[in-house]
Amino acid sequence: MTEMTAAPVTVPGTPATARVLAEAARAVDAPDLVLAVSRNGVRTVHTGGSADPGPVPRELMAYELGSASKPYAGLLLARLVAQGRVRYEDRAADLLAPGFPVHPAVRRITLRHLLTHTSGLPGLPADFYPQAVPRWSTDPYGGYPADRVVRAFLRARPRHRPGTRWHYSNFAVSVLGHTLAAATGTPWEVLLHQQVLAPLGLDATRVRPGPDGTDAVGHRRDGTPVPALDTGGFTAAGAVRATPLDLLTFLEAHTGGAADSPTDSSLAAALTEVTRPVLRRGLRHAHTHTLTWFHHPTPYGPVLFHAGATLGQQAFLGFRPGTGLAVAATATRRVHRADTFVATAYGLLTETR
């Protein structure tokens, strides 16, 4: 158990926080587990798990974030808007394939619709499943490349009029990534690095597997290792890999925790924009969302969070705006019906003063 400032300095952990994390870790069964908390930039990290630790400390391994990659896509879009390079109301088809004939509903889909899951698109393209099902537990996405995602969007028939219903869609956020790449003339991976990763100092965050021995290995429920995730053409929706320490750095930028406020006005504006509630959904409109975060009320103020899962890993990112509290958690076991991982991480965010 260690407690770390945002700078690379290690100091003894706070006993109270250390006890909370150690107790929480007992509720999660995984080969590798990291629970990390930042309070105004002072970090406490608990690592554990049923597997023998390797030569690289668990908190320095890169973990697959799955859908918890979407806040990175959201921050990227917000920064490009703040720079005046695109607008939230720009129509995706016009940027992606100017002049190409598409369904009228597709023509109305904006960048905002894609990011906020209100585009009317399904979770995944209809023709995704035939190629994915035979390798569902090993490589469902790798055989569906970027050009196929784009073609599926341009020939889509949305289920609902854009902007009228919320439906979670990896397809939509992936299209957003390809659209921003087309609009800027910059590959998604380069764009993300230039606009988000490098400015925030996220040197241990990437969208591809790293050198041997630096990436955490996922596991099925029975403990069998699974191969590294290949997201194919769905990069923007789920390809980010990061160490837990980099995850805390990302979250601290949103809370204004340890680091000074960004000096770049567009980045500062984007970090503010992505914390602002923009829509409600569900029964009595009880569920609130920002551009990219789930937003819940708590006795200690609102919390913003996003979870993600891949074939053999899970991740949770969350923070309380204006309080300096952030929680990052990773685990290397596939999610299952009775899984306690997300509930445990969420509890650290919502039940702590």
Image (cartoon, rainbow, N blue to C red):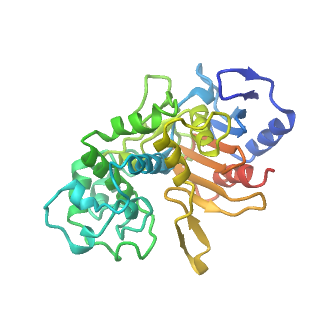
Residue sitting at x 64%, y 32%: 51
Q: Nearer the viewer, residue 49 or 350?
A: 350
In this rendering, is residue 219 above or below 116? above
Q: Nearer the viewer, residue 96 or 351?
A: 96
Asked whether, in this view, residue 337 is left or right of residue 37, the answer is left
The spot of residue 332 in percent (x, y) is: 57, 40
In this rendering, is residue 160 above or below 95? below
In this rendering, is residue 23 above or below 104? above
Q: Quadrant of residue 158?
A: bottom left
Q: Nearer the viewer, residue 83 or 289?
A: 83
The spot of residue 245 in percent (x, y) is: 61, 32
Q: Quadrant of residue 196?
A: top left
Asked whether, in this view, residue 249 is left or right of residue 43, the answer is left
| Farthest-out residue, bottom | 284
Residue sitting at x 63%, y 40%: 252
In this rendering, is residue 114 above or below 162? above
The spot of residue 277 in percent (x, y) is: 56, 63
Q: Is residue 349 visible?
A: yes
Residue sitting at x 33%, y 52%: 86
Asked whether, in this view, residue 350 is left or right of residue 53, the answer is right
Q: Is residue 44 visible?
A: no
Image quadrant for the N terminus? Answer: top right
The spot of residue 84 in percent (x, y) is: 36, 49
Q: Quadrant of residue 7?
A: top right
Residue sitting at x 36%, y 71%: 120
Q: How many marks?
A: 0
